[in-house]
């Protein structure tokens, strides 16, 4: 994609792209809920963007199904590899259709941690189908890396998201309360 289009689509449809996960390496045992938000910083932008976040997960300690939202919907599946390590996969799409086009994101990541701290690298594919010349159809791969801390009641992350085409980056600070 042309320079700037990937980041523009990412910001315009930020509910579709999973910017924040706020999920540590442990697979849910029963039901877990997280409510919080993210602050996004884009270099050379006029200011940060603030997005609310909500998630619910159901699991048996080995496999979980999770759903999260940031103006869009992400459905995911997380599987435990061993204590403190898991794989996480997701499909994201907007809650409401838009006249500009339809974005879709697929992500896959590895979450590893101990003593409450974790790292979560992730690969994201973003596809966009449009019939307008303002936002041409296209697709591309991006990456994420999150460093987080998960306590009994609080979870927080520092992260970045970029793409392989032109090196544009988003910086993310997120936090939430766990129930």
Image (cartoon, rainbow, N blue to C red):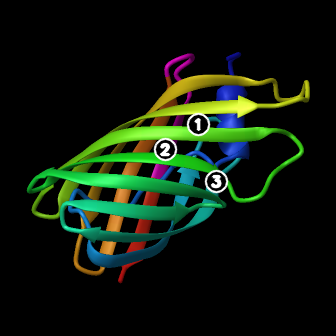
Residue for point 25% across, 59% down: 63
Tell whether 141 sits left or right of 7: left
* Separation of marks 1 and 3 at Cα, in angstroms: 20 Å
- Please tell me whether mark 1 sits on a helix, a strand or a loop: loop
- In the picture, residue 10 is in which quadrant? top right
Question: Residue 76: where, in percent of width, then height?
Answer: 43, 54
Q: Is residue 34 above or below residue 71?
A: below
Q: Is residue 113 above or below residue 102?
A: below
Q: Which residue is mark 3?
A: 15
- Please tell me whether mark 3 sits on a helix, a strand or a loop: loop
* Separation of marks 1 and 2 at Cα, in angstroms: 8 Å
Density class for disc 2 (Cα within 10 Å; few <14, some 14-19, many ≥20) is: some
**Mark 2 or mark 1, which is nearer the start of the sequence?**
1
The label nearer to you, 1 versus 2, is 2
Q: Which residue is mark 1?
A: 43
- In the picture, residue 83 is in which quadrant? bottom left
Instruction: Indicate which disc residue 171 carries.
Output: 2
Instruction: Indicate which disc residue 58 carries.
Output: none
- Quadrant position of the N terminus in the picture: top right
**Mark 3 or mark 2, which is nearer the start of the sequence?**
3
Asked whether the residues under the numbered discs 1 and 2 touch, taking CB atoms below 8 Å apart as contact, a structural biologist would say: yes
Q: Is residue 154 above or below residue 140?
A: below
Q: What's the magenta region?
A: 164-172
Return the residue nearer the eye: 43 or 117. Answer: 117
Tell whether 32 sits left or right of 126: left
Tell whether 168 sits left or right of 14: left
- Please tell me whether mark 2 sits on a helix, a strand or a loop: strand
Asked whether the residues under the numbered discs 2 and 3 touch, taking CB atoms below 8 Å apart as contact, a structural biologist would say: no
Question: Residue 127: where, in percent of width, then height?
Answer: 64, 31
**Mark 3 or mark 1, which is nearer the start of the sequence?**
3
* Separation of marks 2 and 3 at Cα, in angstroms: 16 Å
């Amino acid at each position: 994609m042309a320079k700037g289009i990937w980041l523009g689509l990412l910001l315009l449809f930020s509910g579709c792209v999973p910017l924040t996960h706020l999920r540590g390496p442990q697979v849910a045992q029963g039901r877990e809920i997280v409510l919080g938000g993210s602050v996004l910083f884009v270099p050379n932008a006029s200011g940060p963007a603030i997005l609310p976040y909500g998630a619910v997960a159901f699991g048996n300690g080995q496999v979980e199904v999770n759903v999260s939202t940031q103006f869009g919907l992400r459905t995911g599946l997380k599987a435990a590899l061993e204590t403190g390590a898991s794989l996480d996969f997701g499909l994201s799409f907007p809650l409401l259709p838009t006249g500009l086009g339809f974005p879709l994101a697929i992500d896959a990541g590895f979450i590893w941690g101990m003593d409450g701290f974790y790292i979560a690298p992730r690969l994201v594919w973003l596809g966009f189908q449009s019939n307008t010349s303002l936002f041409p159809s296209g697709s591309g791969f991006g990456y994420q890396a999150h460093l987080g801390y998960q306590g009994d009641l609080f979870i927080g992350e520092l992260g970045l998201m970029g793409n392989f085409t032109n090196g544009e980056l988003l910086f993310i600070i997120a936090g939430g309360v766990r129930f």
